[in-house]
Amino acid sequence: MNFFSILTLLGGLAMFLYGMQVMGDGLAKVSGGKLEQILENLTSSKWKAVLLGMCVTAVIQSSSATTVMVVGFVNSGIMKLTQAVGIIMGANIGTTITSWILSLTGIESSNFFISLLKPSSFSPILAMVGIILLTFTKSSRKKDIGTIMLGFAVLMFGMESMSGAVKPLADVPEFTGLLLKFSNPVAGILAGTILTAIIQSSSASVGILQALCMTGAVPFSSAFPIIMGQNIGTCVTALLSAIGANKNAKRAAMIHLYFNLIGTVVFMILFYMIDAAVHFPFMTQMATPATIAITHSVFNITATLVWLPFSNLLVKLACLTIRDDKKDEVSKEDQEFMILESRFLEKPAFAVEQGRNAARQMEKDSRKALNIALGLIYDYSEEQAERVQKIESKVDRYEDELGTYLVKLNNKNLSERDSHSVSTMLHCIGDFERISDHAVNIMESAQELHEKNLTFSAQARNELQVLIAAVSRIVDTAYQIFDKQDLNLTEDVEPLEEIVDELSKELKRRHINRLRSGECTIEMGFILTDLLTSLERIADHCSNISVCITQVRENLYDTHSHLESLKSEPDDSYFNRLEELQKEYVLL
């Protein structure tokens, strides 16, 4: 094996690892976060959890990615530790699908159709279809499918390059002598563990072993302990992910380690005890890509069947290792913010969905603060006033944490739909926060009325109620538009915003008339002006939310032109709707 063969080997390895990453990313984008949502919601039974973990991992081609997601779920409180066990076990089975696909490289036949099953035969076809989809189609989904095909083709070309580069090693005595040393179970396990820990992918390390088996110089006695070590090495990714996480997330990572470590030790002891008694004939035979895939699957399936009934023991063992500490207890509010889990950023489609959930909660909290504040105008309560302050502080925290999360997410490779969602949220969360600020301003006006023992006249109260009804309606409409992304609802927002402006001007005019007639005081006028200003601003922010969602959906970013176009509709729909609403909100 010369210098150029080594370069070919390294290049093949690079292509293999890159192809696996590209294919995995493409699969994750096509799934649109749905796989992760299934994991989040459908883990009611152990066997169902195993099946889900297996299927999701088989699709995204990475048990490490699945396990890291599980650590994130547990850390954010979405998933219980007992639910995580089954998914982790299922992920170990699902990851074996890669080794079965790679085992197809060992197919040898003169039959045309059987030869076509060999990856080196159909990979060029996938590569051509993939590049056509990427180059000539506009659909983001088709482009993602093209990425998957190209990733798989690059992966298989890398596999072929590695196999070709190491083939001459079969005739090198030093190489075969080195492989024989791995027949020692401890040495083989260490080699498999270290290799997998370095590249952080059991699928990739199994693929490298399968490429070496293509030389025909790897005895099964050496390959077997290496495969066992690879199952331990894959735990490193989850362990690294758990650094900085809460106790339960660290326990989830430890469950993954204990499952593989104890399973490997027990399996190895039983296997070698039986081998000492009956002397398995295949131990001296040369391993093939197919036998590697079989061994990988048999171990993971057997370990799952044995351990699943005793999964609670794994949970107890993890809890004994990572003990509870009172200072690590997380408050209910802090737990709520943990859905913005940094580990989810590795799966952007799912992270976008978590961002939506957080934005919806922020929206609900800002609306709650406003409703409570409006109620205080007529029935002041110190306890309710404090609630408004607390909710506003929480909304402020949402703007800070969610904004930071979305900025990080915006730098990821997002689909067109998810990119629109992130842009919408980044624009709207500022409006939600400002609405909660105005809720505090309204609460302070109500507080001033209470402390100074002032009340609006019956006429002023009735007029204010009409304005509040219009503001409440525009808030409800704008929030529904954000929740449902329903552009049909936007036709009401701008007319309502104009109604609020008209009502506010009329209330100010009527107040001046009452002031002149001595029916009202300047002090009451200041409070009323503050209230009207807050209510007007709230309507403005609702208009911003509606306009933002429309613009992002239609890729338009000139707000002034957009509003002008609404008022210049050929069918006069804007003015017709405005006239209808004017009849609903009449000051007596």
Image (cartoon, grey):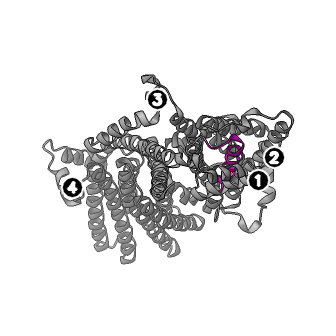
Q: Secondary structure at mark 1?
A: helix
Q: Which mark is residue 563?
A: 4
**Residue depicted at 66% across the width and 36% down the height:** 297
Q: How many marks?
A: 4
User: At numbered mark 4, what does the secondary structure look like: helix, strand or loop?
Assistant: helix
Identify residue type, mark 4. Answer: Leu
Horizontally, is 236 left or right of 526 in the view?
A: right
Give the distance between the C-alpha atoms of the residues marked 2 and 4, in whole angstroms. Answer: 63 Å
Which one is in front, 45 or 320? 320
Question: Which of marks 1 and 2 precedes in the sequence?
Answer: 1
Disc 4 and disc 1 in contact, CB within 8 angstroms: no
Where are the magenta residues, as a range?
217-236
Q: CA distance from mark 4 to mark 1?
A: 72 Å
Q: Nearer the viewer, mark 2 or mark 3?
A: 3
Comparing marks 4 and 3, which lies closer to the viewer?
3
Name the residue carrying label 2: 313
Q: Is residue 348 magenta?
A: no
Badge 1 is on which residue?
186
- Under circle 3, the secondary element is loop
Report x, y in % for residue 405: 47, 62
First of labels 3, 1 by sequence position: 3
Which residue is at the front of the view, 512 or 327?
A: 327
- Tell me the quarter of the picture where residue 38 sits: top right
Whether residue 349 sits left or right of residue 134 in the image: it is right
User: Mark 2 near mark 4, Cβ–Cβ under 8 Å?
Assistant: no
Residue type, numbered disc 1: Val
Whether residue 461 is visible = no
Residue 263 at what x, y percent from top left?
Answer: 76, 45
